[in-house]
């Protein structure tokens, strides 16, 4: 399998530049996931690697060889799209074999590859069926199997689960994870807007925003140590709570002073007395918030809305008086509270994140 190297990659459509100098190294055998909001450039980057769009400037290397001018069919890449793109008049076997037949591969080798891929993806019992007789998840597995039979240098997945319902998404995500385990040397690049897919599948995640890379890291690195406010809020569901105010010092004790509330902060090297009076944003993930008695509460808030989700409850709270932006507590149980009720909250100091006025993490 192959490494993929992107150096100063730019892409423009007419006068509009959508990728602004992307640098990225993907090692052989890595599973790398591109995430970001709609229009951030992640799918465009995938299409540049595939050769479906022309690179405006910069260098793409696949396995150490410059690939800018190599035709798509000669790059050793297989791509799986959102739509299954299966031939309706062909059986599953014929769909998975078609590309190999066009390449002039021997019949016995085609048969071996198709049946091996079908076994990996639990499609053996469906090889004689037509796409119309398959579920959405089975059709997507056929599309993945068609890519596997080609034994490419690099697999590209462009939001392959976006057309599936919730249950099928989970089942097919597990199939993709199993596929990676069975093909540990395969290099895979996967685009999604679903952070659950990213967190569960990726060796490393690349966070795109407006044609730039905000941060690259393992799922836990991005979750625990976001580089800036954008990454902090994008990774995690519900998104990170952000409290805005200014840093106040009472002796050596730091506080975040908000409009109608104050939060005592831990003393330490990050929050220095010289920062007093400056704008400060403090982040805490909803899952790190717990209910508390009034005496030990760090914050108190009025319940705006309660989402009872069976195994957990999301409480949407107003911390500052009259605040319209909710602070969310994700509680691992059913909690019986009513709209307008006052609740008290606590959390551990080591779960707090600090950002300056420009949204950059303080460290």
Image (spheres, rainbow, N blue to C red):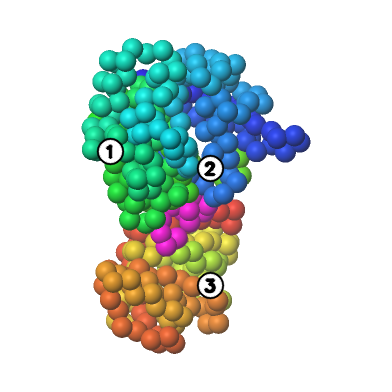
Q: Nearer the viewer, residue 294 or 142?
A: 142
Q: Nearer the viewer, mark 1 or mark 2?
A: 1
The circle on residue 325 is: 3
Residue 334, compared with residue 217, is above or below; it is: below
Q: Is residue 244 visible?
A: yes
Around disc 3, counting alpha carbons within 10 Å, would you say few (fewer than 14), some (14 to 19), or many (20 or more)? some
- Find disc 2 in the rendering and name its residue: 208
Residue 325, compared with residue 79, is above or below; it is: below
Q: Residue at x 44, y 82 (%)?
A: 302
Q: Nearer the viewer, residue 85 or 74?
A: 85
The residues colored magenta run 227-240
Find the distance from the CA under tag 2 to the CA under tag 3.
25 Å
Residue 160, compared with residue 23, is above or below; it is: below
Kindly indicate the quadrant of the structure image that contains residue 276.
bottom right
- Which secondary structure, mark 3? loop
Kindly indicate the quadrant of the structure image that contains residue 313.
bottom left
Looking at the picture, how far across and down is residue 115, in whole percent? 26, 27
Q: Is residue 222 visible?
A: no
The circle on residue 332 is: none
């Amino acid at each position: 399998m192959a490494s993929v190297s992107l150096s100063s990659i730019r892409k423009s459509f007419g006068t509009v530049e959508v990728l602004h100098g992307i640098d990225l190294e993907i090692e052989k055998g890595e599973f790398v996931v591109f995430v970001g909001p709609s229009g951030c450039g992640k799918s465009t980057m995938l299409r540049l690697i595939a050769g479906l769009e022309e690179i405006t400037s910069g260098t793409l290397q696949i396995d150490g060889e410059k690939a800018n001018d190599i035709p798509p069919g000669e790059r050793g890449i297989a791509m799986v799209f959102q739509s299954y793109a299966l031939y309706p008049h062909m059986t599953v076997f014929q769909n998975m074999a078609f590309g190999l037949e066009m390449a002039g591969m021997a019949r016995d080798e085609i048969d071996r590859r198709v049946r091996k891929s079908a076994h990996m993806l639990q499609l053996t019992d469906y090889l004689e069926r037509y796409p119309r007789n398959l579920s959405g998840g089975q059709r997507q597995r056929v599309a993945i199997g068609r890519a596997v039979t080609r034994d490419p240098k690099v697999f590209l997945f462009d939001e392959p689960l976006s057309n599936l319902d919730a249950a099928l998404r989970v089942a097919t995500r597990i199939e993709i994870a199993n596929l990676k385990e069975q093909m540990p040397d395969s290099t895979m690049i996967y685009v999604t807007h679903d952070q659950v897919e990213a967190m569960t599948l990726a060796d490393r995640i690349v966070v795109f925003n407006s044609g730039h890379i905000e941060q690259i890291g393992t799922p836990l690195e991005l979750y625990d140590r976001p580089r800036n406010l954008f990454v902090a809020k994008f990774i995690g569901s519900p998104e990170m709570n952000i409290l805005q105010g200014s840093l106040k010092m009472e002796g050596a004790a730091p506080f975040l002073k908000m409009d109608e509330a104050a939060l005592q902060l831990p003393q330490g090297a990050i929050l220095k007395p010289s920062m007093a009076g400056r704008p400060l944003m403090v982040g805490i993930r909803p899952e790190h918030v717990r209910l508390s008695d009034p005496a030990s509460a760090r914050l108190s808030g009025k319940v705006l809305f309660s989402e009872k989700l069976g195994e957990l409850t999301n409480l949407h709270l107003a911390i500052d008086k009259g605040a319209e932006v909710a602070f969310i507590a994700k509680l691992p149980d059913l909690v019986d509270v009513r709209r307008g009720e006052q609740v008290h909250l606590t959390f551990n100091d080591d779960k707090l994140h600090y950002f300056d006025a420009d949204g950059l993490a303080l460290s």
